[in-house]
Amino acid sequence: MPVADDRGPAPQAQSGNLGGNLVMLMKWWRQPTRDSTIEAIYGVIVAQAREPLFYAQYKVPDTVEGRFDMLVLHLFLYLRRLSGPGFQDGVGQPLFDRFCSDLDGNLREMGIGDISVPKRMQKFGRAFYGRSTAYAKALAAGDRAAGAVALARNVFGLETPTQGVFLLTDYMFEAAQALQEADDGQLERGQFTFPVPRPLAATEAASDDAH
């Protein structure tokens, strides 16, 4: 399963909350209105992470690891938007809890035993925070080269970016901008969409026009 490597360790205050996150999730499940909102938001994130074009044209590995990384990328983009001014801390935590619950359930469906699940969850936590840190730095600096390096290593398992990596990098920056411009209320209610990733043919046509 995917783990973080040179993207840095998870902040202690955050990574130490993984077990508590799953406990808190049970409390949120007792609140139907909040549950439906979190499910709606998480559903949008998961659906976009499964967009076939990422795998067929950008060549994101269609594996457990590849799909995990695309889920991490989209969850990060949404949580990054929520971290800005104007939002109350009422969505981010339960949404992350839902993510943890999803991973926990998937591990158990794969036959991972109760003793091993917490260790795997800690690895997932480190992977999430390590990747989030790398992506956040690239977006904050407007550094597409750094973003491409981070995505190449994390999503594609490559040291040298390929065309698919650059396409996904452009998508990450476009998605971050689109979420920044989205209505706060719609974001909190799960009534938002991510931008449509550009097909390979469209990017090649744009390149030809530029020449």
Image (cartoon, rainbow, N blue to C red):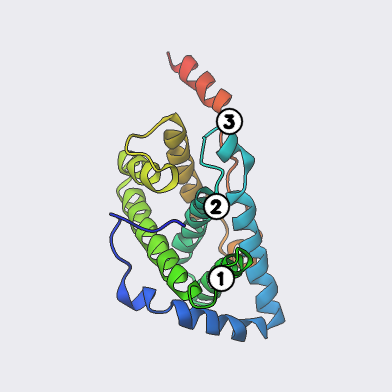
Of pointers 2 and 1, the one earlier in the residue sequence? 2
Q: Which residue is mark 3?
A: 199
| Image coordinates for residue 127, horizontal then vertical, percent | 40, 60
SS under mark 2: helix
SS under mark 3: loop
Question: Label 2 sits on what residue type?
Answer: Val
Q: Which residue is mark 1?
A: 104
Seen from the viewer's position, the closer of residues 114 and 18 is 114
**Furthest-top residue in this view:** 211
Q: CA distance from mark 3 to mark 1?
A: 33 Å
| 152 sits to left or right of 41 | left
Q: CA distance from mark 2 to mark 1?
A: 14 Å
Q: Quadrant of the C terminus?
A: top left
SS under mark 1: helix
Question: Label 1 sits on what residue type?
Answer: Asp
Q: Quadrant of residue 94?
A: bottom right
Dot 3 crowding, Cα within 10 Å, few <14, some 14–19, many 20+: some
Of pointers 2 and 3, the one earlier in the residue sequence? 2
| Image coordinates for residue 204, horizontal then vertical, percent | 51, 21
Q: Is residue 207 above or below residue 148?
A: above
Q: Residue at x 60, y 69 (%)?
A: 108
Q: Say which mark, if any, is on residue 64.
A: 2
Of pointers 3 and 1, the one earlier in the residue sequence? 1
Question: Label 3 sits on what residue type?
Answer: Pro
Q: Residue 192, can we see it?
A: no
Q: Residue at x 51, y 70 (%)?
A: 96
